[in-house]
Image (tube, rainbow, N blue to C red):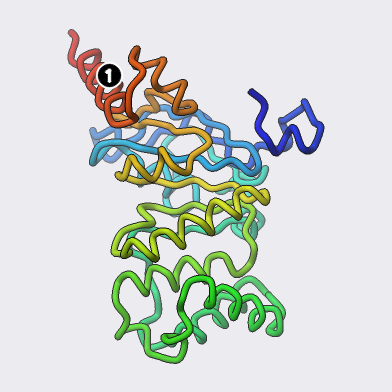
């Protein structure tokens, strides 16, 4: 099925609309092959969720995608730009929020947003306008002038996500976004990311929470032992697992089958 964004554009040639491209990505650490030949393309406006057991290679894949570590083999493109060869052009169009984001503790959220705006050369008036709107959406108004070091993990997480959205990124990569968020604020984050995706922002989300992937994702990928063992819609994954059941059951079947295959001599 053609992606809704492509249908809206009336376009059948999708090559130039691929916002994330991973080609033969490999990362080794000594004898450990943490990522083992991942190939994946994600079009404009797609909400893509990646699942996998602990130490499956999800975060290592993300770090290569956003340019934090260099692949042993292969390459990654963001919005058509090679993240290693054209890092500035790629990062202008990219936002990345790790599971435990780094924030400058001595700054306030307002100051951190101003700092982020300066990094992306955003007009100060736009920073104030966008920052105010994002603060309202993320329920950050009571904390805007308080030192970040005194904020809870969940509030810091919301500051990081709001700041990452400040420059209207074309590609948004987020690792475990619901860590530390209460149900109310988790709902807000999910709604905002889905709204942005529907307006054309490509979202790549890594999570252990299968319910989040099931609720939000247009497509889901499953990484196991460094390989992308399955990718598709929820319906596709059910068909691949051979059973019409919940995502959890499909996930467990697909990863256990891959583990059994890997264990064969």
In the rendered view, tell whether residue 57 sits above or below residue 254: below
Q: Position of residue 255 (x, y in %)?
A: 27, 24
Q: Residue at x 41, y 38 (%)?
A: 214
Farthest residue toward the right?
10
Q: Residue at x 39, y 90 (%)?
A: 146
Q: Say which residue label 1 marks.
A: 258
Q: Crowding at label 1, few (<14), some or many (≥20) Cα neighbours within 10 Å?
A: some
Q: Position of residue 61 (x, y in %)?
A: 41, 41
In the rendered view, tell whether residue 255 sits above or below residue 92: above
On the rendered image, what quadrant is the C terminus found in?
A: top left
Q: Residue at x 25, y 26 (%)?
A: 252
User: Which type of secondary structure does the marked residue at label 1 adopt?
Assistant: helix
Farthest residue toward the bottom?
145
Q: Quadrant of residue 97?
A: bottom left
Q: Position of residue 219 (x, y in %)?
A: 50, 33
Q: Residue at x 73, y 34 (%)?
A: 6
On the rendered image, what quadrant is the N terminus found in?
A: top right
Q: Position of residue 88 (x, y in %)?
A: 62, 59
């Amino acid at each position: 099925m053609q992606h809704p964004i492509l249908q809206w554009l009336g376009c059948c040639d999708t090559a130039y609309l691929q916002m994330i491209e991973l080609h033969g990505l490999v990362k080794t650490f000594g004898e450990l092959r943490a990522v083992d030949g991942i190939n994946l393309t994600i079009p404009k406006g797609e909400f893509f969720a990646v699942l996998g057991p602990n130490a499956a290679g999800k975060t290592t894949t993300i770090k290569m995608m956003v340019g934090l570590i260099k692949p042993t083999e292969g390459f990654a493109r963001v919005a058509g730009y090679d993240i290693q060869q054209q890092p500035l052009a790629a990062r202008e169009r990219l936002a990345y929020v790790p599971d435990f984001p780094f924030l400058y503790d001595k700054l306030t959220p307002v100051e951190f947003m101003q700092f982020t705006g300066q990094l992306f050369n955003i007009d100060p008036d736009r920073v104030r306008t966008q920052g105010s709107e994002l603060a309202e959406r993320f329920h950050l108004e009571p904390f805007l002038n308080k030192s970040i070091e005194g904020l809870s993990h969940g509030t810091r997480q919301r500051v990081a996500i709001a700041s990452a959205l400040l420059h209207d990124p074309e590609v948004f990569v987020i690792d475990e976004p619901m860590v530390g968020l209460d149900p109310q604020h988790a709902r807000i984050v999910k709604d905002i990311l889905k709204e942005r995706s529907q307006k054309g922002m490509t979202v790549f989300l890594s999570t252990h929470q299968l319910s989040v992937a099931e609720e939000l994702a247009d497509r889901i990928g499953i990484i196991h032992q460094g390989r992308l063992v399955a990718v598709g819609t929820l319906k596709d994954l059910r068909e691949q697992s051979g059973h019409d059941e919940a995502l959890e059951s499909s996930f467990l079947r697909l990863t256990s089958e891959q583990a059994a295959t890997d264990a064969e001599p």
